[in-house]
Amino acid sequence: MAPWIWILIIIVVAIASAVAGFFGARKYMQNYLKDNPPINEDQLRAMMLQMGQKPSQRKLHQMMTAMKQNAHDK
């Protein structure tokens, strides 16, 4: 076989591997986020109670807003 055919095969396999890797990683992250959702207000309330704080609804809302803003800034 000619050397240019081998080079073409290697390039096609590399592109196919990259595409398959992208979609595989995307599917994995979707399943992970479905099984382990980001923190919600109930989890934050429980965490504050464990730290000995009495969480008010205003404080919880303030912290959730700050966390969401921080996540969007990254």
Image (cartoon, helix red, strand yellow):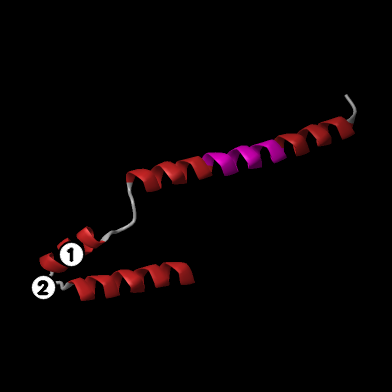
Amino acid on which the number 2 mark rests in the picture: Lys
For residue 63, side relative to residue 18 (left or right): left
What's the magenta region?
14-24
Count neighbours of disc 1 (C-alpha within 10 A) and say few if under 14, some if 14 to 19, many if 20 or more.
some
Residue 74 visible somewhere in the drawing? no
Query: Magenta includes 19?
Result: yes
What is the crowding at mark 2: few (fewer than 14 residues within 10 Å), some, or many (at least 20)? few
Seen from the viewer's position, the closer of residues 68 and 31 is: 68
Q: Is residue 66 above or below residue 1?
A: below
Horizontal side of residue 1 vs 68, given as left or right = right
Relative to 52, residue 41 above or below? above
Percent across and percent down for residue 26 are 52, 44
Label 2 to label 1: alpha-carbon separation = 9 Å
Residue 40 occupies which quadrant of the picture?
Answer: bottom left
Q: According to the image, label 1 marks what residue?
A: 45
Q: Is residue 42 above or below residue 13?
A: below
* Residue under the image location 38 percent in, 68 percent down: 68
Magenta stretch encompasses residue 17? yes
- Residue located 18% across and 64% down the image: 45
Marker disc for residue 54: 2
**Residue 16 visible, this orientation:** yes
Element on which disc 1 rests: helix
Image quarter of residue 61:
bottom left
Amino acid, disc 1:
Arg
**Main structural element of the magenta stretch: helix, strand or loop?**
helix
Residue 62 is situated, as x and y percent measured from the top left of the image, at 28, 75
Vertical placement of 7 versus 39: above or below?
above
Seen at 39% across and 48% down, the residue is: 33
Q: Residue at x 9, y 71 (%)?
A: 52
Q: Earlier in the sequence, mark 2 or mark 1?
A: 1
Residue 44 in the image: state x and y as whole percent.
22, 64
Q: Position of residue 60 (x, y in %)?
A: 23, 70
